[in-house]
Image (cartoon, coloured by chain):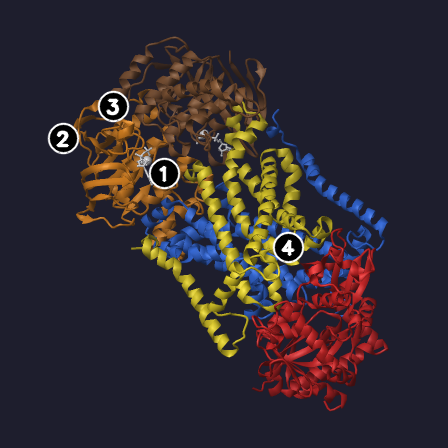
Chain colours: A orange, B brown, C red, D blue, E yellow
Amino acid sequence: MSGIEIRNLWKEYGEQIVLENVSLTIAPRAFVALVGPSGCGKTTFLRMILGQESATRGEILLDGKLLPKEPGPDRGVVYQRYSVFPHMTVLGNVMAGPEMRSARILGRRFGAARRAIADEARAMLAEVGLAGSEDKYPAQLSGGMQQRLALAQALMMKPRVLLLDEPFGALDPGIRADIHALMRRLWNEIEMTVIMVTHDLREAFTLSTRIIAFERRRDRPEEQARYGATIAQDILIWPPRVAGRRTMYEIDLHSLRDDPTTMGQFAGTTRPTGDGHAQTYSALG
Amino acid sequence: MSGIEIRNLWKEYGEQIVLENVSLTIAPRAFVALVGPSGCGKTTFLRMILGQESATRGEILLDGKLLPKEPGPDRGVVYQRYSVFPHMTVLGNVMAGPEMRSARILGRRFGAARRAIADEARAMLAEVGLAGSEDKYPAQLSGGMQQRLALAQALMMKPRVLLLDEPFGALDPGIRADIHALMRRLWNEIEMTVIMVTHDLREAFTLSTRIIAFERRRDRPEEQARYGATIAQDILIWPPRVAGRRTMYEIDLHSLRDDPTTMGQFAGTTRPTGDGHAQTYSALG
Amino acid sequence: QTKTDFKVAWSIYVGWMPWGYAADHGIVQKWADRYGITIEVTQFNDYVESINQYTVGAYDAVTLTNMDGLSIPAEGGVDTTAVIVGDFSAGNDAVILKDSDNLADIAGRNVNLVEFSVSHYLLARALESVGLSERDLKVVNTADPDMVGAFQTPDVTAMVTWNPMVSEILTLPGANNVFDSSDIPGEIIDLMVANTAVLADNPDFGKALAGIWYETAALLTADTAEGAAARAAMGAASGTDQAGYEAQLTATRLFDQPADAVAFVTSPALETTMDHVRTFLFDKGLLGAGGSSPDAVGIEFPGGTVMGDAGNVAFRFTDTYMKLAADGAL
Amino acid sequence: MRLVNVRPDRTVRLMLGLLPFVLLVMAYVIGSAARLAENPNDKLLPALSTLAQTINTLAFVPDARTGNYILWTDTLASLTRLAWGLGISTASALVIGLVTGILPVARAALAPVVTFVSMVPPLALLPILFIVLGLGEVSKIALIVIGVTPIMARDLALAAAALPREQIVKAETLSASSWLIAYRVVLPQILPRLIDSLRLQLGPAFLFLIAAEAISADAGLGYRIFLVRRYLAMDVIFPYVAWITLLSVLIDIGLSTLRRRLFPWSEMAR
Amino acid sequence: MRLVNVRPDRTVRLMLGLLPFVLLVMAYVIGSAARLAENPNDKLLPALSTLAQTINTLAFVPDARTGNYILWTDTLASLTRLAWGLGISTASALVIGLVTGILPVARAALAPVVTFVSMVPPLALLPILFIVLGLGEVSKIALIVIGVTPIMARDLALAAAALPREQIVKAETLSASSWLIAYRVVLPQILPRLIDSLRLQLGPAFLFLIAAEAISADAGLGYRIFLVRRYLAMDVIFPYVAWITLLSVLIDIGLSTLRRRLFPWSEMAR
Ligand SMILES: Nc1ncnc2c1ncn2[C@@H]1O[C@H](COP(=O)(O)OP(=O)(O)OP(=O)(O)O)[C@@H](O)[C@H]1O
Ligand SMILES: Nc1ncnc2c1ncn2[C@@H]1O[C@H](COP(=O)(O)OP(=O)(O)OP(=O)(O)O)[C@@H](O)[C@H]1O
Ligand SMILES: [Mg+2]
Ligand SMILES: [Mg+2]
C-alpha cells in the first residue's frame, strides 16, 4: 500500500538543526511535491526516507513498519546529480536493476532472460525520449538526458516509493511536458507513492496531489543554526487528483505544450487543508 | 554603444555542424534571451561571442570592429557552472576583477584603494543577497548562491556585453524574483548589452527585449551531424522594453513574488518581428 | 646430518671467477656426480650479500676473505671452515694517492674506502708501516663499484680499493699506488669456506669442492688455447676481457697446486696474520661484541692449535681437503 | 594576445618538443669531445661512434661465452621479472584497494597497516627478503611487489572511496548486494585508475628491479649496469639507461592506449 | 544489513587497526625465538631485548670514536639532505609545472623532455652525478632532485591543466594578464596539490637518499644501514628501518595538516 508516516522527525548536523519536529502522514499512492527555499533541508528529508541518512530523533514508518536503516529496492530515487553509472551504457544503466535483482552472483543475465529485460529497458527508454541513445555512455548525454535516464533506471524497479530531487530542472519545456505526461501515466499505472522536490511551483501544481512547503520560521543569521525548518504549508490540490483515474487535467496540459503564450496557466486552484499547518499563501516563495 | 553584429556564423566540431549560417544584429543595450532545445548550440554561441571559441566561418563584430580573438574585460560571463574561483573567499572573488585591473603585478591593492574596492564589492554582494557570506568559500555556498556570486563578480567589471548561460536555474522562486529585479535595475543603469540563455520562457519574457530561439530544422538521427542549428524564431517583446526607462513591467513583478497563484501570468504579449526568421509559435517548445 | 644437495655462493672477484667458470662448463657437475651429490652454484654481484646469505644458513659454502669470514659468520655463531685457500692478494688491493707517491702524505686527507672491508684493514696496516694511525685522517665509506668514478672527482685524493677497480684507477692521470697487498703478502686471503657441521657430516662435499677448484685452477693457469679461452670467458663474466683479467691475475698469488696451499695454511705466518686481523676487527668493534678482548671467538689452525677462546671455536683452517687433492686421493 | 592563448601549430609544437633533446645531445657531444681531447682514454663520456659500436656489439653480436645476444637476454630477463612483479602487485592492490575502499570494516583493519607499509623503504628490506625468499627470481619479484603494492592499494582505495556515495545508494535501490556493488559498480569504475596507477608505478618498479638485480642475478638490465660499473664502462651504461627509459615510455604509452580502448567512458567523464 | 553499511564504532575501529601490527610483532617474536633457540648468536632476527639494548646504545650512548649520539647524528644528516633535496625539487617542480600547465608554448617545448626524464632510472645515473658533482652533499641532494622533480612537475602540470578552462576565461574577462592568471588564479589552486605531490614523493625521496648515502657518506640513516649490513647487524637495521618509516609517517601527517590549515577551501571542494 506504501503509505508513509513520519513522526516527530529531527535532523541535526553537529550543532546545526536542519529539520525540526516534522510530522506528516502521506497517503498511499499520493504524489507529494516538496517545495521550499534553497538549503532548508528538502534533500536531507528525501535522504532520510531513502535510508541513506539516519534521523537524529523521530521515526519513519512505511506501511506501519519501521523503515529499514539502509536503502533497498522498495524505494527508488532520482538525485539532483550523480544519478547514473558512468561506466555503463544507457541501456546497461536501465537494465542494471532487473539484472542485479535476478542474478545475485554475476549481476548479469544471458540469453532469453537478458533479451526480455533489454526489451523492457528499450521500451522504457523510448518513453523518456532516449530511443536511439542506447549505446551511448552517460557522459555523452546532456544534463537533461542524464536525468531522464536516471528516471528510467529508477522506474524499471517499479518501486513502492519514488523519491525525486529536482528531477526536471535541466529539461527544456518541450521535453519537460513529455516527461510530465509520462510521470502522470506511470503514477497511474504503477502502485507507487511519489515524493518530488521542485523549485517550480507550476510543476508542483501540474503533477501533484499535495504540496508541502518546508521553511525555517526563524531565519536571522544568529538563529539559523538553532532552529530547523519545518512544514510551513500543506496544500491539497483541488479538485483532487486520484491515481489510476483520468481527470480533466490532461486536457489542459496538452494545450500547454503547443502555445508558449499560455505557459502561465496552471490547472486547478488550491485549497488549504486546514490542519493547522497551512498558513497564509503569501509565505510561499 | 556595444552593438553586436554576427555575419554568417558557422561552427563545426570535427564532422558535426553545430551552428549553421547564423546572422544576427543585436542593438546596443538590448537584453536578448536565447532559448532552444538542449544541445542545440546556445552555449557554443555564447562562447564564440566571448572569444573562448573561434568560429569555423563567419565573423562577429562588436561596435563595428572585429571581435578580439580572446576574452577580455569588455565582455563578462556567468557560466552554467565552474563560474567562481574556489580558492578565494566570496569577497575575494568579487574584488578580484577590480584588483587585477588596477594592480597589474601583484593583482592586489592595499590600504585605501583596497578598502574602496571592498566597499563596492560588499555593496554588490548585498544586492545579490549574499551579505553575511563575505568570508565563506564558494564550496560553502549552495549552487544558487554560487551563481549569484558569479553574477556579482561579473557585474563588478561593468562589462559592455554580459553573457549569461542559464544563470538562474538553481534559484528558488523568491530569490529568483529578487535577482530578476536586480538584473533589470543594473541593465537600466549600466551601459550594457545582455545575452542570456535560459530554458525558462517565463524568465525570458520577464526580462528580455527580444527572444531568439535556436533550433535544428532537420533533426532525424542521420541528419543531426550534417545540419546545424540556426535561428528559428526571433521575437521582439511588445510593448517594447527600453533600457534606462521604467515601464509597467515592474509592477507586475512585485505581485508575482507574493502570491503563488498568480505565477502563471507574465507581462506583455509577443509579436513576431516579421523578418522572415519567425515562424509559427508552435515550434517554440 | 648427511644430505646430498648443497648450495654454494660466489661473488665476482678475480680469484673466484673459476667457480663460475666451473659451474658453466660442467666441472661442478662432473665432481658432484662423482660423489653422488648435487651442487648448486649461485653468482652474487654483491659480495656482502653472499656472506650474509651464508651466515643465515641459506648456503652451505661461500667465497670470502679471511677477515670477513671471521667478522661475519664466525662472529655470528656460524662455525665455519676454510675448505680451500684459493689465493692471496699480492697487489690486488692497493692504497692509491692522487698527486703524491709518498704514503705518509695520506695524513690529513679524506680516504675513500669500503669501511670494515679488507681495504680498511690494508689501510690500517699501511698506516702502521709509516707510524700513522686512523686518527690522522678521515675515512669516508664509498661503495666499491663507484670507486673508479669517485676517483675522478676533485675532492677525492686518497683511496683504498681492490681489483678490478685498482687497475682502472691506476690508468687515470695522477694516480699513484703507494701501498698494496704485496707489501703484506699472505694477509688478505681468498677462501672457499663451508659450514663446519655440514662439512663434518658430509666430507664428500669438501672433496668435491677441492676437485672442482684444482681442475679449474689448472685450466686457468694453463698456457694453452683452452687456458686462454677459459681466461677470456672469466674476463667476460667479470665485465672485462682476457687481457684485463690476466692483468688482475698477475696481482694474485693463485694456489693452483694443492701442495702450495697446504704449505701456506700450515705455516706459522698464518697465525700471525689472523692475530693482526682479529686485533683490527676488535679495534673496530666488529669482534667479540661488548667483550674486552679479541679472544672471544676461537680460531683453529691445522693441527688443532686454537687462538682465542677454545670453548667458542667458530673459524677453522684445515688442510684436509687440499691434502687429499695434493695426494691425488680425491 | 596573451601568452596563455598562444597556441603553436603542429609543426612548431613538434620542433619545440624536439629542441631540448637536440640540445641534450649537443651538450653531450661537446662535453665528450672536450674530455676526449684531454684524455683519449676517457671513459666517462664516450664518443658517439664508440657508443654506436658498443650498442652493435651488445645487440647484434652473440656473446662469446654463452652465444646469447646480451642486450636481448638482459631485456627478456628484466621484463619477465617486471611483468610478474607488476602483475602480482596489480592484482593484490586491486583486491586490497577495492575491499578497503568500500567496506568500512576492512578499511578499519587494513588502512593503517597499508599506510605504514607503504612508508617502509623497500631497499632497506632487501637483505631480509633475500634471506627469507632465497636469491632466485622470487625475491626480485617480491621486492617489486612490496615496493609497489601498498602505494597502488592506497591509490585504489582512495579512488573507490571517492565514488559518490549517491552511486552506492543508487545501486542499493536497484537491489544490489554488497558483492554486486563491489563487482558491478565499484570495480569497473576503478579499473581505469588501476591502469593509471600502474603507469605511475612503472618508474619505481624499474628502480626496485635494478636494485634487486644489482645484488644477485646473472642476466638483466640492472645486473649488466652494475657489473660494468666497476670499470666505468659508460659506453654500456648510457645505452642501457636510454633503453630502459625507452622501454618505460613505450609501456607507458601502451598502457594509456589500452586504457582508452578498454574504458572509453572514462575519457569522456573528464 | 549489507556489509557496505556496517560501520564499526571508534573502539572497534581502533582495535581492528592495531590488530595487524600486533600480529606482525608476534610473528617476529616467534620467528626470532625459534632462530635463537637454534643458534644463540643468530644475527638475522635478534630478540626484542637485544633490539631495545641496541636502540638505547644508538640513541643515548655517545659513540666511543666520535663522541656523537649515532642515531641523532645520522637522522640530522639525512633529514638535512632530504630537506634540501625536496625543497629544491618542490620549487623547481612548481615553476616547471605551472609554466607547462598554462602556457601552450612552454608545454610544447618542455612536456616531452620532462616525460622522458621522469622515466630515466636515476640510480643508473649515479656514477655520472658523482663525477660531475663530487662525492659531497651536492650529489646526494642532486639525486633526490633528479629523481623527484620530473614526477612532481608532471603532476603539477596536469593539475594546472585540469583547471576548468572556464576559470581561465573568467579571469580574462576580469582583465587578468597571463602573469596574473598564473599568479592569482592557477598558482594558489595548485599549491594544495603541490603538498600532496610532495607527500607522495616522500617515499621515493627517502629511497634515493638511502641509495646515495649507501654509495658515499660518513653519516646518515642510509649510510648506517649499508655499513652495518657488512656484519649483518639486523639489530641496527630493523630499528633504523622502523625509524625511517616513522619519520615518513610523521612528515606525511605534518604535511597533510599543513595543507588543511593553509588551504581550507581545498578540503571543502571535495
Ligand atoms: N553532510 C552534511 N553535513 C553538514 N551539513 C549538511 C550536510 N548536508 C546538508 N547539510 C546542511 O543541511 C541543510 C539542508 O541541506 P539540503 O541539501 O537538504 O537542502 P535543500 O533543501 O535540498 O537545498 P537545495 O534546494 O539547494 O537543494 C543545509 O544548510 C546544508 O548546509
Ligand atoms: N568541445 C566540443 N567538442 C565536440 N562537440 C561539442 C563540444 N562542445 C559542444 N559540442 C557539441 O555541440 C553541441 C552544442 O553544445 P552546447 O553546449 O552549445 O549546447 P547547449 O545548447 O548549450 O545545450 P544545453 O541547453 O544542454 O546547455 C552539442 O551537440 C555538443 O555535443
Ligand atoms: Mg537539495
Ligand atoms: Mg549550454
* Residues at circles 2 and 3 in contact by the CB criterion of under 8 Å: no
Calculate the distance from the C-alpha at mark 1 to the C-alpha at mark 3.
29 Å
The residue that label 3 is drawn on is B260
Q: Which chain carries label 4?
A: E
Q: Which of marks 1 and 4 is in front?
A: 4
Q: Nearer the viewer, mark 1 or mark 2?
A: 2
Q: Which of marks 2 and 4 is in front?
A: 4
Determine whether the beta carbon of the residue marked 2 sits less than 8 angstroms from the nearest atom of ligand 1. Answer: no
Amino acid marked by disc 1:
Val
The residue that label 1 is drawn on is A128
Q: Do labels 1 and 2 share a chain?
A: yes
The residue lying furthest to the top in this view is: B245
Calculate the distance from the C-alpha at mark 4 to the C-alpha at mark 3.
75 Å
Calculate the distance from the C-alpha at mark 1 to the C-alpha at mark 2.
39 Å
The residue that label 4 is drawn on is E212
Q: Are marks 4 and 3 on the same chain?
A: no
Label 2 secondary element:
loop
Q: Mark 3 lies on which chain?
A: B
Q: Mark 2 lies on which chain?
A: A
Amino acid marked by disc 2:
Gly
Amino acid marked by disc 4:
Ala
- Observer-nearest residue: E206 or B25? E206
Q: Where is residue E171 in the image (x, y as percent from the top left)?
A: 52, 26
Label 1 secondary element:
loop
Left or right: where C71 falls relative to E176: right
Q: In this view, does A72 lie above or below B244?
A: below
User: Is residue B79 among what the camera can see?
Assistant: yes
Left or right: where D147 falls relative to C88: left
Calculate the distance from the C-alpha at mark 2 to the C-alpha at mark 3.
19 Å
